[in-house]
Image (tube, rainbow, N blue to C red):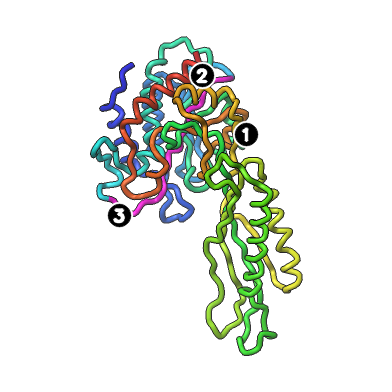
Amino acid sequence: MTFDAKRYREQLQALVAQPSVSCAVPDWDMSNLGVIELLAQWLEDLGFRTQVIPLAQKGKANLIATLGQGDGGLVLSGHSDTVPYDAGRWQSDPFKLTEKDGKLYGLGATDMKGFFPVVLEAVRAFTDAPLKQPIIVLATADEESSMSGARALVDASALKARYAVIGEPTGLRPVHMHKGIMMESLRVRGQSGHSSNPALGKNALEVMHTAMGELMALRSEWQEKYRNPAFAVQVPTMNLGCIHGGDGANRICGECELHFDLRALPGMDNAELHAAIDARLRPLAERSGTDIVLSELFESVAPFGESADSELVKACEALTGQSAEAVAFATEAPFMQSLGMQTVVMGPGSIDQAHQPDEFIDTRQLEPAVEVIQGLIRRFCL
């Protein structure tokens, strides 16, 4: 079937025109239902059975659309939301698709609304085919913030298949590993007092200084213990991102809070890392007589690793002519994998264009992406 570039642009324009920002900041957060309803209608028109599954969060939903029957099959998955945007830094309207020099500009064009019209183009060739296993199109909510859509699928065991492709922008290179992500808050509660007499209080800033040393020591220990040469940054990383404490130079600081992130390698366990940090800081709290509270800023995402020898990875490599690689950014892949599916992250576009003004997808990648997905459907569904 010939790739219909005009239809692709029209569908991507319609998706981009539906604002669907997800964000932990309530003033930015939006519903994704406009995107979900558009996709559901287009897929129903192609003969798919659709389920719009509301989430606990008001105005949020996942979409599962299925063509064919069976307990195996192939999931083609994308998230329906985008990150927030700074309209003043865009050279065009973020919600109006603009084409220039073979590039389609718009919020979410590459990350990752642009994947869905690729899927729609790919599946048209199979609407009357004798499928042995189903084609399943999945659109999730809130990947850019809490990943609540993927978490809800796992909690409800709402998706059964054998293979999953998550169409994040990878330049059509298969990704079979990525780091996890934890974002943590460390709060020290001391006692304020007049700065002329340190005995009048317990300085939370000074205790935090020691706590930060303990965190950096743990980081060094983990980087000595864990290494994976498949990654550009071969070791787990910890970034001390922001700190707030105290209210005046002449007062003993009564409370101080640090936010940091930790990106673990496949094979490391986020819960164990959290417990190790907590155990490392507990003696400091006892010595200093302060409260030290470690808590998640949001639920962590596990590291992801699919065997390089898995059937899906090998099929993606054969169809793209590119070897599977590892990346630093996190995706919904570990959630799909936890449901029992071989999982690969692979889609058109570049992550370099994501999360910034003038986001675009290169039109030269679209037809090859359709052909790759059709090859996977022939391999795993016919």
What residue does disc 3 label? 89
Q: How many neighbours does mark 2 have within 10 angstroms: few (below 14), some (14-19), or many (20 or more)?
A: many
Residue in the image at 59% along x and 25% along y: 310
Q: Quadrant of the N terminus?
A: top left
Tell me where the magenta segment starts and ends, as one range: 72-90
User: What secondary structure is marked by label 1?
Assistant: helix
Q: Position of residue 302 (x, y in %)?
A: 61, 43
Residue in the image at 60% along x and 49% along y: 236
Q: Alpha-carbon distance for marks 3 and 2?
A: 43 Å
Among numbered discs 3 and 2, the one appearing first in the sequence? 3
Q: Alpha-carbon distance for marks 2 and 1?
A: 20 Å
Count of numbered marks:
3
Q: Position of residue 51 (x, y in %)?
A: 48, 28
What residue does disc 1 label? 338
Q: Is disc 2 in contact with disc 1, using a CB cutoff of under 8 Å?
A: no
Q: Amino acid at mark 2?
A: Pro
Q: Is residue 273 above or below residue 133?
A: below
